[in-house]
């Protein structure tokens, strides 16, 4: 009996994963409003009843897809920083910023995370999702840069929230106006560089 329950659990997990995989490109290409649950179920090769067995409604499925995208973006940032082998923690922070802004060019990030998620999930839930994946990485990068004396000794958690907020706003700007990428990139890096200058020359602080 226990073996049978495990098999049922595995089948349920496989169905859930198939629905997320099927929904992700559809939502990225056409957006939340233009994609219905029957189409997602067909793409996943399951019945609509199976979809509603796994997810309460389309919004619930969208939340799972958005989390899947957010998780992949965070893993991409970690991999990119590791591959670039930055010389110091401040360089690692700049690399992560570039990797995030680059990721915003991907249709699934732009459409799912930046255009649809704030509306479909609600602003508070969207912020919680972004923070749940990006907060730990941002805190780590900031803490190591602060310890190395490359950034001012601000409290790490509030500092991380400010940086994440700035990056989200930069991403929204790029999603709305792709041509703004270079200018937005310069502004975000400029914030970090200005803070770094304050750390190296405390007398320049306001």
Image: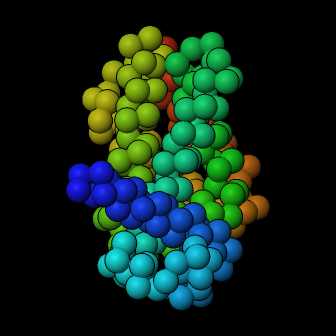
* Rendered image coloring scheme: rainbow
125 left or right, relative to 49: left
When asked about the image quadrant of residue 26, the answer is bottom right
Q: Nearer the viewer, residue 84 or 197?
A: 84
In the image, what residue occupies the spot 68% across and 74% down?
Answer: 29
- Residue in the foreground of this view, choosing between 181 and 53: 53
Q: In the picture, which quadrant includes the C terminus? A: top left
Can I make out residue 120 in this image?
A: no
Residue that appears at 37% across and 56% down: 7
Find the residue positioned furthest to the left.
Answer: 1
The image position of residue 190, as x and y in percent, is 59, 37
Count the numbered circles shown: 0
Residue at left offset 69%, top offset 58%: 106
Please state which of residues 159 and 84 is positioned toward the viewer in this rendering.
84
Quadrant housing the N terminus: bottom left
Judge from the rendering whether residue 120 lies leftward or rightward of residue 153; answer left or right.
Answer: right
Task: Please state the horizontal and vertical placement of residue 65, each as a whole percent of the image.
Answer: 49, 64
In which quadrant of the rendered view does residue 52 lie? bottom left
Left/right placement of residue 159 relative to residue 28 reads left
Residue 202 in the image: x percent, y percent? 41, 17
150 with respect to 23 (left or right): left
């Amino acid at each position: 009996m226990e073996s049978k329950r495990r098999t049922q659990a595995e089948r349920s997990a496989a169905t859930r994963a198939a629905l997320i995989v099927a929904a992700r490109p559809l939502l990225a290409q056409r957006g939340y409003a233009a994609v219905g649950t029957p189409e997602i179920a067909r793409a996943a090769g399951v019945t609509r009843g199976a979809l509603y067995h796994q997810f309460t409604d389309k919004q619930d499925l969208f939340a799972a897809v958005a989390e899947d995208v957010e998780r992949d973006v965070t893993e991409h940032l970690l991999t990119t920083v590791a591959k670039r082998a930055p010389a110091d923690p401040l360089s690692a922070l700049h690399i992560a910023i570039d990797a995030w802004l680059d990721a915003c060019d991907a249709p699934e990030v732009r459409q799912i995370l930046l255009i649809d998620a704030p509306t479909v999930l609600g602003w508070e839930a969207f912020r919680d999702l972004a923070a749940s994946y990006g907060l730990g990485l941002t805190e780590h990068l900031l803490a190591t840069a602060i310890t190395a004396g490359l950034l001012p000794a601000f409290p790490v958690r509030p500092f991380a929230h400010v940086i994440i907020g700035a990056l989200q706003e930069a991403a929204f700007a790029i999603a709305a106006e792709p041509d703004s990428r270079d200018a937005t990139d310069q502004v975000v890096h400029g914030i970090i560089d200005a803070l770094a200058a304050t750390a190296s020359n405390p007398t320049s602080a306001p």
